[in-house]
Image: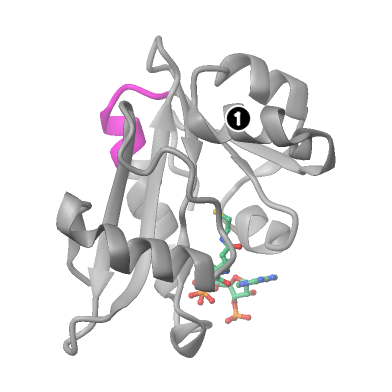
Amino acid sequence: MELLPYRREDEADLIRFLTRVDLTLSGLDGVGIRIWIDRGDDGAIRGTTGYELSDDRRHALIRSVAVDPSGRREGRGTMLARAALARATADGARTAWLFSRRSGPFWQRLGFQPADRDELAHRLSNTHQVALFRRTGKLNHEIAWSRPLEVMRR
Ligand SMILES: CC(C)(COP(=O)(O)OP(=O)(O)OC[C@H]1O[C@@H](n2cnc3c(N)ncnc32)[C@H](O)[C@@H]1OP(=O)(O)O)[C@@H](O)C(=O)NCCC(=O)NCCS
C-alpha cells in the first residue's frame, strides 16, 4: 500500500470516493486536515485515511478512514487506520478520537473505547468535522470513540 498525501488534483476523485463510502466531505482542503490516498494499479482510489489536530496538537480526530467496498475484509482498513494513528502520534497527538456509528467493532479491535462526544467536541472544537456536526445537529446522534496514543497497543 502506497499512501500519498492528498493534493488539489485528487479533489474530484476524493469527493466521489468519500460520497460512495458515505463519509463527510467537510473541510477537505482546509487548514489542519491531513489526508492520504491509496490508489490501485488502475489509478482508482482503494482507500483513504486522515485526521485533524486540535489547536494544541495533543488531540487527533481520526477521519476519512475508508476502503472501497470491493476491497474490504482484507486488512486494508486496519493498515489505513494504523497509518493515521502512527502519523498523528508523530505529529505530537497523545489521544486519538473519532466518530463512528457503524464501525465500532472495527475500532475496538484497534484499542478504541466508547468516549464522551461532548468531550470530543470540546477538545477538537476547531476541527471541520466537529463544526459540521454542530451546524447540522448531527453531533447529538454520533457515537464517539477514543484511545491513548502513547503506546500503540496492537
Ligand atoms: C471500517 C472499514 C474502514 C474497515 O475496512 P476493512 O478493510 O474491511 O477492514 P479490515 O479488513 O482491516 O477489518 C479488520 C476487522 O475489523 C472488523 N470489521 C471491519 N469492518 C467492520 C464493520 N463495519 N463492522 C464490524 N466489524 C468490522 C472485522 O472483524 C475485520 O476482521 P475479519 O475480516 O476477520 O472479520 C470499512 O468497512 C469502511 O470503509 N467503512 C465505511 C467507512 C467508515 O465507516 N469508516 C469509519 C469512520 S472514519
* Magenta stretch holds residue 74: no
In this rendering, the answer to whether 96 lies above or below 110 is above
Q: Is residue 76 left or right of residue 40?
A: right
Q: Is residue 74 left or right of residue 141?
A: left
- Three-letter amino acid code of the residue under disc 1: Val
- Residue at point 68%, 51% (across, down): 100
Which range is magenta? 87-93
What residue occupies the far top of the structure in this picture?
56
Question: How many numbered marks appear?
Answer: 1
Point out residue 34 in the picture as x, y percentages from the top left corner.
Answer: 30, 40
Q: Position of residue 87 (x, y in %)?
A: 29, 40
**Viewer can see residue 7:** no
Q: Is residue 82 above or below residue 70?
A: above
Q: Nearer the viewer, residue 150 or 61?
A: 61
Dot 1 beta carbon under 8 Å from ligand 1 = no
> Residue lying farthest right?
140
Q: Which residue is mark 1?
A: 130
Looking at the image, which residue is at 46% across and 32% down? 149
